[in-house]
Image (cartoon, rainbow, N blue to C red):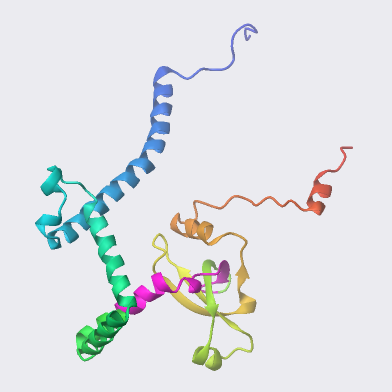
Amino acid sequence: MNDPLSDPTVRPGVLARLRSSFLTGFVVILPIGLTIWLVWTLAGWVDGVVLPLVPQTFRPEQYIGINLRGVGIIFFLVFTVIIGWIAKGLIGRSMLRYSENLVNRMPFVRSIYSGAKQLAETVFAQTDRSFERACLIQYPRKGVWAIGFVSTEAKGEVAMRAETGSMLLSIFVPTTPNPTSGFLLFVPQEDVIELDMTIEDAAKLVISAGLVYPGPKVKHDATALTTDAKPAS
């Protein structure tokens, strides 16, 4: 027979409370520590590449006696801004055209330079050609669904030679957990299901291998309010 005066709840012991506090602290510290470590490592890598190219007279440790990490990033940013400013001028454009004509005469170097230039222009310059929205398509076969990103409408020879009577969309299907690699598919518009989630939420879903889903969006329309506000019977 149970004693009604006794407390039915069992309080966790000291070790259980310490374990719970440790796990909570570890969850808080891990992303912060990992972010700091990545930034620190990246700054050291940039310093190791850039600082050997900087003359000793321009290095701040010659005057303050301390090797500051991250100085190479500042030198790189200043150098990049100067090069961009020169390239916009008449002399800079002339020098750039002359250099490109010289590189185009080199068989092996030409392919590397053209590929790197096209990649840089796509990533940094053409911001208006970024992904428009997330979507669902059946890939690699019907009945199997994959997250994709709508980039543009198919144009040119691809749109003309494709054996379909509807408009084609360029869909990028990323891989998990590295979304920078994937597959380019041209899918008819009627086979593409557009999602309400943002590009960032879809990328998180892909990177986490389906573990992180975006939260439900709350609809503030009048019909939802009247439907939810039914009187209790």
Q: Position of residue 131 (x, y in %)?
A: 51, 69
Residue 122: quarter of image: bottom left
- Residue 221, compared with residue 6, is above or below; it is below
Q: Report the span colored magenta.
A: 116-141
- In the image, what residue occupies the spot 42% across and 23% down? 16
* Quarter of the image with the N terminus in it: top right
- Front residue of 156/190: it is 156
Q: Position of residue 86 (x, y in %)?
A: 29, 74
The residue most toward the front is 90
Taking 101 as reference, is 198 left or right?
A: right
* Quarter of the image with the C terminus in it: top right
Residue 190: quarter of image: bottom right
- Residue 100, compared with residue 1, is above or below; it is below
- Front residue of 156/14: it is 156
- In the image, what residue occupies the spot 53% across and 87% down? 155
- Front residue of 116/215: it is 116
- In the image, what residue occupies the spot 46% across and 70% down? 127
Taking 177 as reference, is 71 left or right?
A: left
Taking 13 as reference, is 149 left or right?
A: right
Q: Is residue 150 magenta?
A: no
